[in-house]
Amino acid sequence: MILDVLYFAWVRERIGLPRERIETKAPTVAALVAELAAREDRYAAAFADLSALRVALDQDLSDFDAPLSGVREVAFFPPMTGG
């Protein structure tokens, strides 16, 4: 499957890209994260602590164990705080 993967805030800074289109066979978000982290050190650094990350699938907040079937867009970002 082809996915648009978006990176926000410090995730984008560590990876060095705001977005990319990737081809994957990952069945879940966690499997996608493992695949990305294995690419290069910059990805490994961005995904080193999943407790510091949130994920949205097609703009809906989700969990790392969520399936990717039918998903077109995955976004990774730090938790948001109120102000």
Image (cartoon, helix red, strand yellow):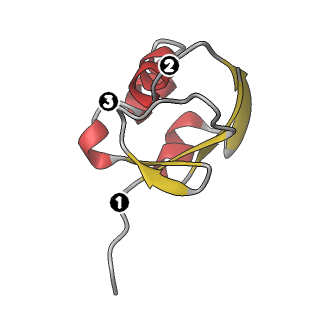
Q: Name the front one of labels 2 and 1.
A: 2
User: Which numbered disc, 2 or 1, marks the residue that appears first in the sequence?
Assistant: 2
Residue 76 against residue 66 in the figure, above or below: below
Secondary structure found at label 1? loop
Quadrant where the C terminus is found in the figure: bottom left
Quadrant where the N terminus is found in the figure: top right
Q: Name the front one of labels 3 and 2.
A: 2
- Inspect this view and state whether residue 9 appears: no
| Front one among 25 and 36 | 25
42 relative to 30 in the view: left or right: right
Instruction: Identify residue type, mark 3.
Output: Ala
Q: Residue at x 52, y 21 (%)?
A: 36
Q: Which residue is mark 1?
A: 79
Secondary structure found at label 3? loop
Q: Which residue is mark 3?
A: 48
Q: CA distance from mark 3 to mark 1?
A: 15 Å
In percent of width and height, residue 53 lies at 36, 47
User: Which numbered disc, 3 or 2, marks the residue that appears first in the sequence?
Assistant: 2
In percent of width and height, residue 64 lies at 36, 36
Q: Residue at x 54, y 30 (%)?
A: 68
Instruction: Identify residue type, mark 2.
Output: Pro
